[in-house]
C-alpha cells in the first residue's frame, strides 16, 4: 500500500509525521520524547526494534504559528520573519485555467498544512523540516499580468506594466512571471522546505522563472532597535504604515466593492531587487551617509531631532539656515507628505549572493511593497525618487515584478484565487 503523507498514525522508516512530532514536543516538555529506555547503538539494540526518531521539544520561536486562513493572505501585515524565499513561476505550455485551478488548490492546501506544522498533503514529504515547527511560516501568492491571457481572463487595470524609471537596469529574465510566491519564516530550513514543497507540487503545471532568498534580523537577537537594518547599516522601515492607522486598510487593501470584485481584500505587490553599491557607500563618511538618508545611522532618529519614531520636521533649519533634512535626503523625497499621501507597506529583506566579476559585492535589498493600487502607491513615489533622491547614486534596480495578491481564504476547503478562477 502506498504511503499516505497525511496519515498521522504512520510510523514508517521515515519516522513520525510533523504533526506527531509537534504533538510529542508539546507533551514531552524540554526533555523531548523518549523512544525506548536504554536504547543504544550496538547490534543487539538495532535488531530489537525499528529505529524511530525522537521528537525534539520546540522552542517558543519554533512553535509560533500564523494562521493561513483569514480575510487577507498571511505574509502582508504580520511582523517580518527572519528569512524570505521569493519565487516566480511560469505556467508550462498548454496549462490553462483548469490546470491553474488544480495547482492553486494543491498549493493552498499545502500552505495551510505547513503553517500549522503539519505534513503537506499531496506528495511524500522530503523530511527536511521533520523536527521543525511552523516558525511563523507564511506563504503569499500573487498573479502576474502575463498569466491572464493564458487563463482567458482580463487582468486588473492596476496590473498595467510599471513605467520605466531612469535608474532601472532590469534583467527581464529575473523579473515578472505568471505566478509569484513569497515564503517567510523564522527558520531557514522551514522556508526552504516550504518552497521546495510548492515547487514539487507545481510539476507539470508551472516551472520556476527565478528565485531569490533574503534575510533580516533574527527575533530576539537584540531588544533595540525593533526596526531592521539594511546592508548600508541604516535602520529601514521606520515610517511604514501601521495596521492601527485609520487609513491603513484603504492604502494597503482593495476595498470590498473594488474593481475587479475578485480582488476584494487583496493587495498589489511590487517586488524589486535593488543592488547596493556598498564599496562606494562605505567610502562615504558617516556624516555624509546620514545626510543622504536624513537619519542618524546609529539611532535612526531624523536629522531634524528626536528619536527613531519622532515625526520628521521637514521645515527645521540648522544654525546656518540650511535644512536639517536636506532637500534630496531619501526620507524627504519618499515621505507621503511630499507625494500627495502616497504610501505602501514595505517588507524589505537583505541579500548577499557573493561577489560580481568586478569584485564588488552582489548584495542589497529584496524590496516588497504592498498597496491597494500601485498607480497611487509605488509609482508616484518611485518617480520622485528617480528624479531627486541622493540615495540613487548608491543603488541599482536590477529586477522588478508587479503582482495581484488576492484576498485570503476565509475557511478551510477554499483556495487562493478561487473568486477569479471560478468566475
Image (tube, rainbow, N blue to C red):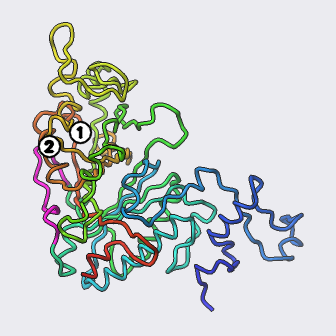
- Near-viewer residue (312 or 130): 312
Q: Residue at x 67, y 70 (%)?
A: 20
Q: Would residue 48 be found to the left or right of residue 107 on screen?
A: right
User: Few, some or many C-alpha atoms within 10 Å of disc 1 (few <14, some 14-19, many ≥20)?
Assistant: some
User: Few, some or many C-alpha atoms within 10 Å of disc 2 (few <14, some 14-19, many ≥20)?
Assistant: some
Give how far across and how far down residue 276 sits, in percent. Answer: 28, 39
What residue is shown with label 1?
A: 395
Return the mark for residue 265: none
Which quadrant would residue 386 be assigned to in this image?
A: top left
Q: Secondary structure at mark 2?
A: loop
Q: Secondary structure at mark 1?
A: strand
**Disc 2/disc 1 C-alpha distance (Å):** 9 Å
In the rendered image, the vertical position of residue 46 relative to residue 71, given as above or below: below
In the rendered image, the vertical position of residue 22 relative to residue 361, given as above or below: below
The main secondary structure of the magenta stretch is: loop
Q: Would residue 182 be found to the left or right of residue 369 on screen?
A: right
On the rendered image, what quadrant is the C terminus found in?
A: bottom left
Give how far across and how far down residue 284 sits, in percent. Answer: 28, 23
Q: Residue at x 23, y 44 (%)?
A: 343
In the rendered image, the vertical position of residue 358 relative to residue 261, given as above or below: above
Question: Over which residues does the magenta segment extend?
Answer: 155-170
- Near-viewer residue (183 or 360): 183
In the rendered image, the vertical position of residue 185 relative to residue 407, given as above or below: above
Amino acid at each position: 500500500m502506498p504511503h499516505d503523507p497525511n496519515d498521522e498514525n504512520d510510523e514508517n522508516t521515515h519516522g513520525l509525521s510533523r504533526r506527531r512530532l509537534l504533538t510529542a514536543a508539546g507533551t514531552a516538555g524540554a526533555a523531548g520524547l523518549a523512544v525506548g529506555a536504554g536504547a543504544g547503538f550496538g547490534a543487539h539494540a538495532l535488531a530489537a526494534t525499528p529505529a524511530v526518531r525522537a521528537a525534539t521539544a520546540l522552542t517558543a520561536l519554533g512553535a509560533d504559528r500564523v494562521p493561513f486562513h483569514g480575510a487577507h493572505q498571511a505574509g502582508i501585515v504580520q511582523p517580518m520573519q527572519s528569512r524570505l524565499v521569493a519565487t516566480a513561476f511560469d505556467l508550462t505550455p498548454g496549462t490553462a485555467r483548469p490546470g491553474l485551478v488544480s495547482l492553486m488548490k494543491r498549493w493552498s492546501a499545502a500552505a495551510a498544512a505547513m503553517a500549522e506544522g503539519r505534513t503537506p498533503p499531496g506528495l511524500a514529504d522530503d523530511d527536511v523540516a521533520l523536527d521543525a515547527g511552523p516558525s511563523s511560516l507564511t506563504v503569499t501568492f500573487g498573479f502576474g499580468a502575463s498569466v491572464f491571457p493564458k487563463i482567458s481572463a482580463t487582468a486588473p487595470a492596476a496590473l498595467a506594466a510599471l513605467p520605466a524609471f531612469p535608474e532601472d537596469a532590469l534583467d527581464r529574465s529575473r523579473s515578472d512571471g505568471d505566478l509569484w510566491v513569497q515564503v517567510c519564516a523564522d527558520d531557514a530550513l522551514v522556508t526552504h522546505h516550504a518552497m521546495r514543497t510548492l515547487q514539487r507540487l507545481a510539476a507539470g503545471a508551472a516551472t520556476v522563472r527565478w528565485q531569490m532568498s533574503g534575510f533580516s534580523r533574527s527575533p530576539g537577537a537584540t531588544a533595540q532597535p525593533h526596526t531592521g537594518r539594511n546592508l548600508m547599516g541604516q535602520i529601514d522601515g521606520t515610517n511604514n504604515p501601521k495596521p492601527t492607522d485609520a487609513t491603513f486598510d484603504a492604502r494597503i487593501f482593495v476595498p470590498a466593492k473594488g474593481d475587479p470584485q475578485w480582488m476584494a481584500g487583496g493587495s498589489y505587490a511590487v517586488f524589486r531587487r535593488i543592488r547596493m553599491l556598498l564599496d562606494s557607500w562605505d567610502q562615504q563618511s558617516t556624516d555624509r551617509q546620514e545626510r543622504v538618508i536624513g537619519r542618524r545611522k546609529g539611532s535612526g532618529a531624523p536629522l531634524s531631532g528626536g528619536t527613531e519614531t519622532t515625526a520628521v520636521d521637514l521645515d527645521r533649519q540648522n544654525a546656518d539656515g540650511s535644512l536639517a533634512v536636506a532637500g534630496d535626503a531619501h526620507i524627504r523625497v519618499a515621505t507621503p507628505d511630499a507625494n500627495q499621501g502616497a504610501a505602501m507597506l514595505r517588507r524589505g529583506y537583505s541579500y548577499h549572493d557573493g561577489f560580481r566579476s568586478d569584485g564588488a559585492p552582489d548584495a542589497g535589498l529584496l524590496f516588497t511593497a504592498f498597496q491597494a493600487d500601485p498607480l497611487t502607491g509605488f509609482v508616484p513615489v518611485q518617480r520622485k525618487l528617480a528624479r531627486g533622491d541622493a540615495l540613487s547614486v548608491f543603488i541599482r534596480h536590477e529586477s522588478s515584478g508587479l503582482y495581484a495578491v488576492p484576498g485570503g481564504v476565509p475557511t478551510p476547503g477554499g483556495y487562493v484565487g478561487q473568486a477569479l478562477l471560478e468566475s
